[in-house]
Amino acid sequence: MYRVLLVDDEPLARMGLRETFDWEGNGYRVVGEASNGRSALPWIERGEVDILITDIAMPVMDGMELMRVARERCPSLKIILLSCHSDFAYVREGIRMGATDYLLKPTMQPSDLKEVLDKARSQAEEERRIRDLMEHRKLAQRREELEKAFARLLMGEETAESTAPELHWLEAGYRAVVAELDGAAKLRSEEGGIYTEILMEELQESFYEEYGGEGIALRVGAEQLILVLRCTEGLQRLQAKAAERGSSMTLGVSGQAAGAAGFRRAVREGREASRLRFYEGPGALREYRGEPAGAGAARAREAQEKLLTALEGQIAGGRAEEASRLLDELADQWRRHRPSPAEVKRQARDLLASMRLPADAGGEAAERLDALRAMESLEEVRCLLHGALHSLERADARPAGSEDAGLHRRIVTQALHYLGSNYTRNISLQDVADHVAVSRNYFSELFKKVTGQNFIDHLIHLRLEHACSLLRTTTLRVYEVAELSGFNDVKYFSKAFKKVMRVSPADYREKGQAGGEEGS
């Protein structure tokens, strides 16, 4: 409720104001009364007043002086003047000084009071909205500057202190947290690049809502954030935000660091901690555990290279059973000594390259290499390599032939017709795959291969085209346009629209109308 202070030297006038109007029923509360300007000032100085209703002619301190002092001490205060016909010159001066409006005491009705009170409230709300918007823009600009400074720091170009001296908490100590979206490649394939980009933006916003000015969230790549913060409490809420969107995040937390000089080391530690996902699974918060012992790590690498050489020899000799045994032994070495995921994938690539598949299986081999790049767990890599071994073993028995590209096109064409008729409904990849009678994963890969576009990206573009048409040709509200175009979340719709169209839905409509007026 808006708080109102009544100031008039006539007790009957104050009583009339207080008793003849339903204050609380209209969203206001009278916090006090005063007989002159001086006695009214304590309420104003304590910040207990939103709207001041004051008579002009009063002893000790009149309404004009009260208005001047009150606006100096509380610029956002809304002021309504009470006037008699004889002091209308003062009213004009008061309006010039910033009063919202005035009321004539001899003829004032409750409806008049409600009208000027609502006007004052509307002004206060609009001013607050503008202040909040300006503050948000300043904060966003400052954050962007800080993020750029930390990006330069990450690349070793400069120290953060040189561009962000107010980050005094860096010297007091901080941690770097590497936050990675789990299953990013699958998300991109099934949900599309727009979805993952918006999700990462929302997670970045959630971080700033949680930590305010006591942290930095730096976007690195499409599915990773580097967080710099003093305290790791509250990070689970970031994971919960990802879970709300049907995703999960792995968080790798560095050891304690201090000053800009320790930033790159802290990020390296955070990345090492997040890479434990490869061995221990996704969706957890893991702290840095230190570097492996130098001599032990070197011996482990040497043993892995020997196994790799022996395994390649068994593959070359066509001894699949022994190759499978050695592959399990190599996977066990990886699991115990935990080399970096990049090193495991390098060794796996070498193994795949050593498998001499028939020429007509080249596409399958290329797909395995693409899949390997996106893998996030050791078990996925192990299964991929075993699958390649089995394919090699069966290669001679498999009849020659090529994929039926015509069949693929027919399946996707059928799916496109179905999408064209149903894109405004709440349909999913699974729904369309069921319609064309193939598995979800197979359809996802097939759709991208034939159209060159992710299924979800295509669906979003269909919905956005429909939304553009509605914005140009109707007066529907934005949330109604979103609903009729197949979006059940207006916030997501607005972000997706701006990401693709480069303007907000409201600006798009305004530009479309302006263009129509110019053409008419």
Image (tube, grey):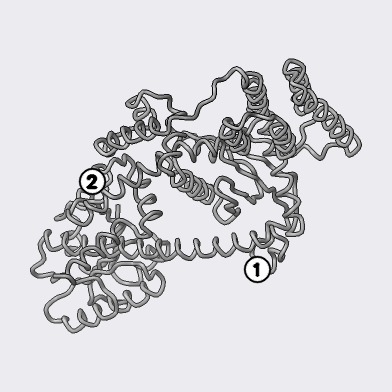
CA distance separating discs 1 and 2:
45 Å
SS at mark 2 in the image: helix
Q: Between residues 303 and 266, which one lies in front from this camera angle? A: 303
Left or right: 410 in relation to 149: left
Q: How busy is the neighbourhood of tag 1: few (under 14 within 10 Å), some, or many (20 plus)?
A: some
Frontmost of labels 1 and 2 is: 2
* Residue 241 in sight from this viewpoint: no
Amino acid carrying label 2: it is: Glu
Left or right: 7 in relation to 72: left
Farthest-out residue, bottom = 89
Q: Between residues 466 and 243, which one lies in front from this camera angle? A: 466
x, y percentage for residue 511? 26, 65
* Residue 457 in sight from this viewpoint: yes
Q: Between residues 346 and 62, which one lies in front from this camera angle? A: 346
Q: Which residue is mark 2?
A: 480
Q: Is residue 342 above or below residue 67?
A: above
Give the mark, 1 or 2, whose residue is nearer the N terminus.
1
Res 310 label: none
x, y percentage for residue 408? 40, 32
At 67% from the left and 40% from the top, the residue drawn is: 252
x, y percentage for residue 150? 65, 59
Q: Quadrant of the C terminus?
A: bottom left
Farthest-out residue, left = 107
x, y percentage for residue 437? 36, 23
Q: Is residue 401 above or below residue 138?
A: above
